[in-house]
Image: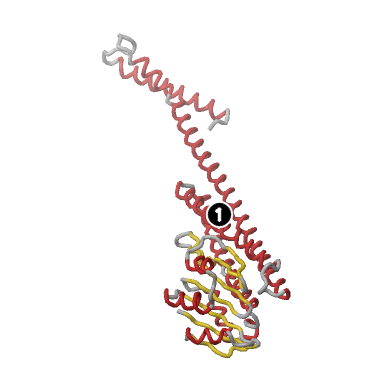
Amino acid sequence: MVRYFIFSKGRLIQESSDVPFLKVALYEEGVDIWVDMEQPTQEETRQVLEQIFNFHPLAIEDCVAVSERPKVDQYEGYFFMVVHAIDFSRSQHQFATTELNMFIGRNFVVTYHVDPLRSIAATIDRVLKNPTLVARSPDRLTYYVVDLLLDNYEPALQELASDMAQVEEDMLAESSKITLSEIVHLKKQIQDLRNIMTPQREVIARVAHGEFTPVRASMLPYYRDLLDRITRILNTAETHRESLSSSVQMLLSLQQSQTNHVVKVLTVLATLSMPLLIITSFYGMNIRHFPDTEWPTWPWAYAWILALTGGITGLVYGILKRRKWL
């Protein structure tokens, strides 16, 4: 689906999906155009990107193909930028990324994405309600799109923090292999987030430093603000990663403590059973020895054996208790 908006001096003068008319509007003086392509067909992609805007074949290839890393390239009269939106699923404990491709020129912005994006929907809503604020120029419109895209990072990080708190609570209640697996999985998700945000910070940094001509000098402070936001997101992700590393160490310590406790209990039981084993082994020898097999001697003999065993066991227990080994 192709949807475009035509602005003049910050005023929305036309909204349409008529692709053939777009080529006429592109060359009108004093207008800015925003073209949003959401899950376009091959024919729409060819019409808009190749025939109307005549973008570079390499830029079109990068736009259509799935790119796992953000990037930015300068071409004659425009620059091409790839950024990523994220969403965190608490049910799957996983970040989902959506790619947003943008062509920014002197009087146009073209956004291309396969899946719906909340940042695009929110920008369209702002354009319809207050176009003067958002659409006074392509570089300002681009800023608002990226700014709203970064707004979705905060809820995702909050969801992640809630998951981390729940995992830590479960870990302290009862550690298990499943809990360790969840921690490792969350660490992987944070690493995936950092792998996306680190190159995305480099992309915005290049724009914020005035490397691309369609971005005016007056807009550079706004892009530097975006750079600061990405840096804060990365710092938050790094804090979460360190917290999960501490959780792993804590979990391993708890598991080691539980193992030591089990070994301690088994050692105590083995120690307390030693008198019984020694005496029963001694009187189990295949020789005629006290107690003999004649009645009524053997009942008293076995009573004596049991009493002796209990006495020695109690003595061992008292020694262990005095030494505070129990």
Query: Measured along the vertical axis of the image, is residue 236 above or below residue 130?
Result: above
x then y, percent, for residue 231: 66, 61
Q: Residue at x 37, y 15 (%)?
A: 282
**Of all residues shown, which one is farthest toward the top?**
288
Q: Is residue 36 above or below residue 303?
A: below
Q: Nearer the viewer, residue 245 or 188?
A: 188
Residue drawn at point x = 45 percent, y = 49 percent: 178
Asked if residue 125 is positioned above or below residue 115 in the image, the reply reads below
Give percent across and percent down for residue 247: 56, 49
In the rendered image, which quarter contains the N terminus? bottom left
Q: Nearer the viewer, residue 261 or 51?
A: 51
The type of residue carrying mark 1 is Gln
Would you say 177 lies left or right of 120 here?
Answer: left
- Which residue occupies the extreme bottom position in the image? 13
* Quarter location, residue 198: bottom right
Q: Which residue is mark 1?
A: 191
| SS at mark 1 in the image | helix
Residue 18 at what x, y percent from top left? 47, 86
